[in-house]
Image: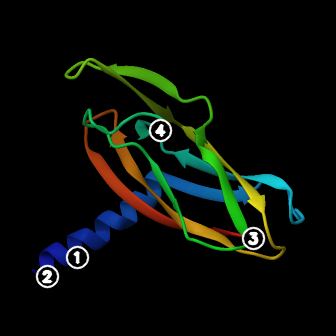
């Protein structure tokens, strides 16, 4: 039991080395009534890929998901959009999926309802090695204001 705990801890450390996330707003100081974008940007290590958010997860790869904590300071407008992902076809299922290498960007439009609110939530997805096929699920929290 102790071995599994320690192995999991070491594994999580490696996960931070595979991708690094930055979350920001497209415009600082937005006023109530204005629309801005929450920008999610990830640096991805060489020889790894991050699956995008714009395909159905019924073919094996899991799409990246963004969950926003409810807050009356903003409203979501539309869906999260992936910015220029690469596209491939899964040979097993003969279905297309999208992914990123090196860098990934996603954007979510929000409408500001109150000044000074915090926008928070989680990012969940799958990173896979292009060298050995190892896939690592991840979940990260984010917060911007």
Q: Residue furthest left?
A: 1
Q: Quadrant of residue 145?
A: bottom right
Image point 57% across, 47% down: which residue?
A: 43
Precedes in sequence: disc 3 or disc 1? 1
Q: Which residue is mark 4?
A: 52
Q: Which residue is mark 3?
A: 145
Mark 4 or mark 1: whose residue is earlier in sequence? 1
Q: Which mark is residue 2?
A: 2
Label whose residue precedes the other's in the sequence (2 or 4): 2
Instruction: Check the image and report above or below for 94 versus 46.
Output: above
User: Circle 2 — which element?
Assistant: helix
- In the rendering, which numbered label is found on residue 18? none
> In the picture, residue 4 is in which quadrant?
bottom left
**Closer mark to the observer between disc 4 and disc 1:** 4
- The residues tagged by marks 2 and 3 sit, at their Cα atoms, a distance apart of 40 Å
Which numbered disc, 3 or 4, marks the residue that appears first in the sequence?
Answer: 4
Rendering coords of residue 88 (x, y %): 40, 21
The residue at 86%/60% (across/down) is 33
Residue at x 44%, y 51% (from the top left corner): 18
Q: Would you call the spot at circle 2 few (<14 residues within 10 Å), some (14-19), or many (20 or more)?
A: few
Q: Does residue 86 appear left or right of residue 56 in this picture?
A: right
Percent coordinates x, y for residue 17 in the rendering: 45, 57
- Cα separation, mark 3 vs mark 1, equals 35 Å
The quarter of the picture where residue 10 lies is: bottom left
Q: Which residue is mark 1?
A: 6
Residue farthest toward the bottom in the current orientation of the protein: 2
Cα–Cα gap, marks 3 and 4: 25 Å
Instruction: Give the crowd class for mark 4: few <14, some 14-19, many >=20 residues within 10 Å.
Output: many
Is 70 situated above or below 106?
A: below
Characterize the local packing of mark 3: few (<14), some (14-19) or many (20 or more) Cα atoms within 10 angstroms. some
- Can you give x and y, in whole percent of width and height, for residue 62 in the image? 33, 43
């Amino acid at each position: 039991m102790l071995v599994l705990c320690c192995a999991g801890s070491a594994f999580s450390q490696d996960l931070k080395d595979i991708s690094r996330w930055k979350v920001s707003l497209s415009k600082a100081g937005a006023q109530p009534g204005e629309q801005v974008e929450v920008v999610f940007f990830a640096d991805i290590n060489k020889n790894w890929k991050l699956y995008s958010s714009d395909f159905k997860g019924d073919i094996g790869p899991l799409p990246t998901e963004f969950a926003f904590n409810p807050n009356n300071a903003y409203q979501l407008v539309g869906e999260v959009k992936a910015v220029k992902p690469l596209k491939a076809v899964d040979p097993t299922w003969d279905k297309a999926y999208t992914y990123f290498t090196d860098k990934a960007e996603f954007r979510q439009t929000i409408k500001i309802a109150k000044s000074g609110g915090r926008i928070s939530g989680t990012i969940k997805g799958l990173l896979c090695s292009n060298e050995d096929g190892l896939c690592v699920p991840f979940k990260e929290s984010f917060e911007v204001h």
